Image (cartoon, rainbow, N blue to C red):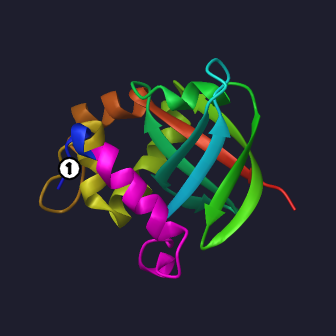
Amino acid sequence: MKVPDWLFGFVNPVMVTMLRSPLHPLVSSSILIIEFTGIKSGKRRTVPVRYMYTGNQPCCTTSIHNGWWHNFKTPQKVELTLAGKRMAAIATAVSHDPDMLSPILREIWSRHPADAAYMNVKLDKTGQPDPNDFDRASDEAVLINLELRS
């Protein structure tokens, strides 16, 4: 089920609180917090996002229609809360690269089918995306690579 956009103002702070609490194991295997300072606004942003690992580094996806990813067109320092631990990372956005994004989207949606709705992709009974929806979503998706720092 897709959470309506207007509800994220309530859901995101609740998710952030949970991810920073001893209850984080309920959701932290697939959701992390990314914190950064907006390049233009200078304001601190805190965004909970679904993530997965590619190799030994986490990554997340969003839509080109969401504004926060623009902060990572060039690599930027961020702080993550990942599995209950705060850590430094470098975030870099990759957009308009369907060849790179397609397998990541397929993997995320195989693990979390409801997330396909956020990219307006319909899945069939077997969990496969509608080909037209998938092609559009692959072109409109943004990958945020998160390089962990020690």
Which quadrant is the C terminus positioned in? bottom right
Dominant SS in magenta: helix
The extreme top residue here reads 40
Q: Is residue 108 left or right of residue 124?
A: right
Q: Is residue 118 left or right of residue 19?
A: left
Name the residue beneath numbered marker 1.
Answer: 2
- Asked whether residue 30 is in view, the answer is no
- Asked whether residue 22 is in view, the answer is yes
Please, what is the three-letter code of the amino acid marked with disc 1?
Answer: Lys
- The picture places residue 73, in percent across and down from the top left corner, at 66, 25
* Neighbourhood count class around disc 1 (C-alpha, 10 Å): few under 14, some 14–19, many 20 upward: few
- Residue found 14% across the figure and 54% down from its top: 124
- Residue found 51% across the figure and 57% down from its top: 51
- Residue found 62% across the figure and 33% down from its top: 93
- The picture places residue 78, in percent across and down from the top left corner, at 71, 45
Q: Is residue 31 left or right of residue 10?
A: right
Q: Nearer the viewer, residue 19 or 102?
A: 19
- The picture places residue 143, in percent across and down from the top left corner, at 55, 39
- The picture places residue 61, in percent across and down from the top left corner, at 48, 43
Quadrant assignment, res 117: top left
Which quadrant is the N terminus positioned in? bottom left
Number of numbered labels in the structure image: 1
Q: Is residue 40 above or below residue 123?
A: above
- Write the start and end of the magenta stretch as one range: 8-29
**Element marked by disc 1:** loop
